[in-house]
Amino acid sequence: MPRLSEVITALETLWPAERAESWDAVGTVTGDPDQEVSRVLFAVDPVQAIVDEAVTLGADLLVTHHPLYLRGTTTVAAATFKGRVVHTLIKNDIALHVAHTNADRADPGVSDALAGALDLRVLRPLEADPSDPDGRRGIGRVCELDHPLTVRELAARAARRLPATAQGIRVSGDPDALVRTVAVSGGSGDSLLDSVRAAGVDAFLTADLRHHPASEFMAAGAHRPLALLDAAHWATEWPWCELAAGQLDEISDRHGWGLRVHVSKTVTDPWTAHAASPSTSTDTPGAPN
């Protein structure tokens, strides 16, 4: 069996820490470099439910997309939510490694996995990484469909192909407009709206679109309508877990490590229910029926 340090070296060839944003917190959070690794679990969030799953599975290494500590802390006391996570990991000899914005920028990365889940053909990054001479790394992806779909059909495909969540897919724009090209970005994407407009695509699928940026974007594009599709944050990033697990599987086979690699199917999206409005007409909100 490989040591943790060997596995981490392999993971950092896929997602070098230096390619993460300066504000990010990536890399190894817990774990002894000399401990042996035989089983690895991939997940989006390092929350207690996932850590408990890792314990039950007998995993030696948990790899998550989201950081455990994105900001500084003064305690890892088990009385705190994150402290309990740390205590559980250490007590059970489970290492935690994080690949966040360095996995977003990777080739292939988080948005490639999202595009793959939707059967979209990737053309180029939405925002290219200037340090990549080949122009393949970067944030988001510009993609095309094999054949045009309406916005309604594209939203239905996303709802079917991405993991089920209470939110589903929210849509802004003409549901009957044809879509040939799509920009995608796993996770929060409204900081990319200017790049989306410049890319000349027909639709943008991402997560966490806020009211004002989305409203202003749609109003500013009245001369060239463009649809927005807003999925749950967790759902847009979960396909990366399968991609990353496959990459580690290949590395394990190449080195003869025999790692057993798993992907968590535990839904860690924080929203657990959805109550649809009784009507989507232009009736006055709150008016009696």
Image (cartoon, grey):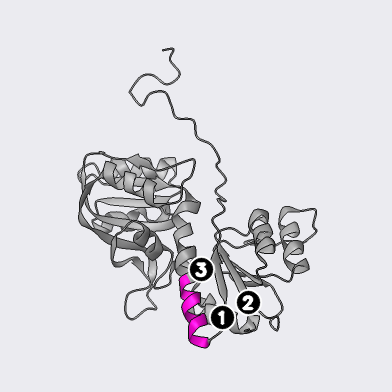
Other residues around mark 1 within 10 Å, as few (<14) / some (14–19) / many (≥20): some
Counting residues from the start of the chain, the first of labels 1 and 3 encountered is 3
User: In x, y percent, where is residue 22?
Assistant: 54, 69
The Cα atoms of the two marked residues, 1 and 3, are separated by: 33 Å
Tag 1: amino acid: Gly
On screen, residue 108 above or below 145: below
Position of residue 100 in the picture relative to residue 76 (left or right): left
Q: Which stretch did the figure color magenta?
A: 246-255
The answer to which of 106 and 56 lies nearer the viewer is 56
**Which residue is disc 1 drawn over?**
258
Tag 2: amino acid: Ser
Other residues around mark 2 within 10 Å, as few (<14) / some (14–19) / many (≥20): some
Q: Residue furthest top?
A: 288
Numbered disc in front, either 3 or 2: 2
User: In x, y percent, where is residue 46?
Assistant: 62, 60
Magenta run includes residue 172: no
On screen, residue 113 above or below 232: below
Quadrant in the picture for the C terminus: top left
Q: Are marks 2 and 1 in contact (CB under 8 Å)?
A: yes
Residue 97 in sight here: yes
User: In x, y percent, where is residue 67?
Assistant: 60, 63
On screen, residue 136 above or below 87: below
The Cα atoms of the two marked residues, 3 and 2, are separated by: 31 Å
Q: Which mark is residue 38?
A: 2
Label 2 SS: loop
Magenta run includes residue 249: yes
Q: Which mark is residue 21?
A: 3
Tag 3: amino acid: Glu
On the image, which quarter does residue 265 sit in? bottom right
User: In x, y percent, where is residue 276?
Assistant: 45, 30
